[in-house]
Amino acid sequence: MTVTETASEWQKASYIAGQAADARVNVELETEGMTLNIGPQHPATHGTLRIVVRLDGEQVLWADPVPGYMHRGYEKLCEVRKYLQINTLVNRIDWLGSFANEVPYILATEQLMGIEAPTRAQYIRTVLFELSRIANITLFLGDMGVQLGAITPVFYAFRDREHVLNLIEGATGSRFHPNYNRIGGLKDDLPKGWIADVHAVMDRVRHFCDEMEELLLGNEIFSTRCRGIGVIPAAVALDYGMSGANLRASGVDWDLRRDDTSSPLAWKHADWKVWTHPDGDSFARYWVRLQETREASKIIDQLLDGLPSGPIMAKVPRIIKVPEGEAYVQTENPLGVMGYYVVSRGDLGPFRVKIRSASFNNVSICPWILRGVYVPDIITILASLYFILGDIDR
Amino acid sequence: MSLLALSYTWTTVIKVGVVAAMTLVGPLIFVYVFLFKMMSHMQSRLGPMEAGPHGTLQPVVEAIKFLQKEDIFPERADRLVFAAAPFVVLASTFLLYAVVPAGPRLVVENLNTGVFFAMAVSSISVIGILMAGWASANKYSLIGGLRSAGQLIAYELPMILAVVGVVIQAGSLSLQDIVHSQADGSMFGWSGIGNPFIITQFIGFIIFLIAAQAELTQTPFDMPVAESELVAGYMTEYTGIRFLIFFISEFGTAFAFAALASTLFLGGWYIPGVHGTAADVLGPIALMAKIMVLGFLIFWIRFTYPRFREDQLQRIAWKVLIPISLANIVITSILKVAL
Amino acid sequence: MSLVPGFIKGLGVTFKTMTTRAVTVQYPRQKETPPNRSRMVIALSDENCTVCMLCARECPDWCIYIEGHNDLAPPRREGGKPRKANVLDRFDIDYSLCMYCGICVEVCPFDALFWSPEYEYSEVNIADLLHDKDRLVDWLQTVPEALGLEAGAEAKKGAK
């Protein structure tokens, strides 16, 4: 209640009485807040994110995320590496969906050089991109359960993610850090029998999604824990620069895979749907990611069925020297929009690479969203925002 | 225990020995069967396989591992309280075993207020948990301890109220008498399997199980030890033997509560058609089977569900369970008087 | 919406999993075979190496150490001049630094480096992860034949 010029005498009197009563209570029950450091070493932050929260009882007065404990200086490293060497570095930004990190960087470099990879290469890139999305998001689908106390889903997630990682290993040679993209194409073509394996695994992934839906999403306890917790209205989400599933869960129908028509990648050749949810709460974020996993498996199936034949490498000079210029390419990565701004001065390596990673923006909403929630909800919200530490700190 | 003419001192020693052994054996069985094997298979893995055949000795190995760890005290901890807390919690578990009958004559202490005693000693653990939470001088421990105290007090009530229905029906507070009244009872004139109170007191049984789940701080009521937010709640600062004692008492209490529930609702040691000495031999086996079934239920729920938030679980206790159990008591007493 | 409440369905899922076979592979006794292309360890064919240093230069974290010297090799034709040849003295890869990116294998113009899917070389002492020339040559036996490519792939010109 506020006292305004037009307020009546009675209103003023009751306001003063209310203030006096509050003051009395405060004197009688003087409580002291508590500052709690969640992290940098804490089971909920899966990494080294530190969140300083000021608590009144179990309620958060304010929260302040302190990133940077895992800063690895990628942008500076990129200035002293050659183009291909950077490719193996950027793998490690979002380590769960590592293939997806390479793609926007390679696309930006290709754009600078004026090269476009052949269609087959673009298809395979898209397939692996979506595979890394599944590898990334399945872990979220299980991990959300762990953060809410259900330990079983995460084991199912690891079990079925293993198959996806095996596929990535089968094609690229490495489970986590594929380094499979090359400027102008791919390192190698797919090995024999790979496509059949993928179809089998995609069935498993869809089965996993059904399992998660029964085990976690349909659980009444899960929905009481998640519904209405950490509601982000669409306008706020856009103001904080959020992207990916976090934004779509707030009802913003924006997906670069569909909306970026100039992208050479092959999403436009598949029939799929962008899911949005109007609620914007933790439940919506989980739901949207679950649907996205299913869509990704459909995209992969369709693209592999329509895989064109042909070369996988465009004509590229032996020594890669990128002409002067600058390019910015962003793609819809598992965690959200990831972009690389590459500036070249005509050397063997770029002059400057600015990396826009999704998690940093997604987590920057923490002070706004964590105000007034309870301690258990901090964990729910952090888990549902889904960040990868490497993606925040780079 | 009248068959052996022993002095009071020796009977006491034997009784304490039996209870102490059960306090260790119960958790060992539960940890191996449920925590190691059932959980692992539910999560599509094998669990420990190395120590002994199928990892049977793994709980012992774990205990030895904890025993050889350094006993660390936090610098700012209240040393005496910190050191004593696990033993207070263990004492509560220990005393619970004393009253559960395993056969017509196989009971450590046949108190005529057995149910009352069991409910009373199970609340002692709250003190130990509060002591641990406060003395650790750790913010996570403090939050965990306070949550735990609030939760245990809230769920103590529905548990006791659920038991009251059984007590009214049996007309006795003695656990042995409750078993007897289930064995001698009949359902609509048919006395083939006696009258286990799970049939007439089904609501009470469900409330007892839910409350027991909460008393044991198992998921979905494990907010006090929520590992993803409070690290390990009131146990955060504990290592070595003191952590082991907390661990034993957690699973020991689970075993004891399963035993209590099977005594109160499933007929305890009673097997239809078995009486006298045979019941003394087969009774413990029957009780064990029932305990395992209930333990399976408790841990099945634990490994499947996410957890409630603190305010939500308080709401369930005060707004749902307590009114229902009160209504259950009223209906039971009306029927008891009417029939 | 089905009539079965969600919390009962969840119990069904865990129970069903309990009755199915566990997926655990008990590692030291059972082993999974990694895919043919797995990048696990780098094998060296020292006859092919010409000490050109390309791999050492392209390595993103400079974990390859090469030393060599010039030597005279016997002439190709009888009566000819002795040829100049580079002799490899040292070829070490420090696997504690290696990022397994595969750039060295790719840039090698003389096919001296190969990937092998052999992964059991963990060490107690980190210094032992520095594999010297002999050890790298030993890995050569474990290098598999490259498998065929998926349908629609174009054979590489001058295939490696």
Image: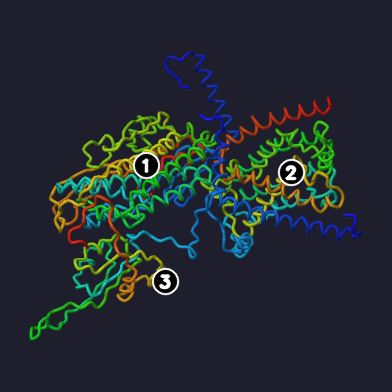
Q: Position of residue B170 (x, y in %)?
A: 82, 36
- Identity of the amino acid at label 1? Ser
Q: Answer left or right for A142 relative to A108.
A: right
Q: On what subunit does the disc labeled 2 rest?
A: B
- Binning the other alpha carbons within 10 Å of mark 3 as few (below 14), some (14 to 19) or many (20 upward) gives few
Instruction: Name the quadrant of the N terminus of chain B.
Output: bottom right
Q: Name the foreground residue: C75 vs A136.
A: C75
Instruction: Name the quadrant of the C terminus of chain B.
Output: top right
Q: Residue at x 44, y 51 (%)?
A: A40
Secondary element at image label 2:
helix
Measure the alpha-carbon separation of dots 1 and 2: 48 Å
Residue C80 numbered mark, or none: none
Secondary element at image label 3:
loop
Q: Which residue is mark 1?
A: A297
- Identity of the amino acid at label 3? Asn
Q: How is the image coloured?
A: rainbow
Secondary element at image label 1:
helix
Measure the alpha-carbon separation of dots 2 and 3: 55 Å
Q: Residue at x 27, y 45 (%)?
A: A307
Q: Position of residue B197 (x, y in %)?
A: 76, 37
Q: Position of residue B27 (x, y in %)?
A: 67, 54
Residue B262 numbered mark, or none: 2
Q: Which residue is mark 3?
A: C125
Is disc 3 on the same chain as disc 2?
A: no
> Nearer the observer, disc 1 or disc 2?
1
Q: Answer left or right for B133 relative to A77.
A: right
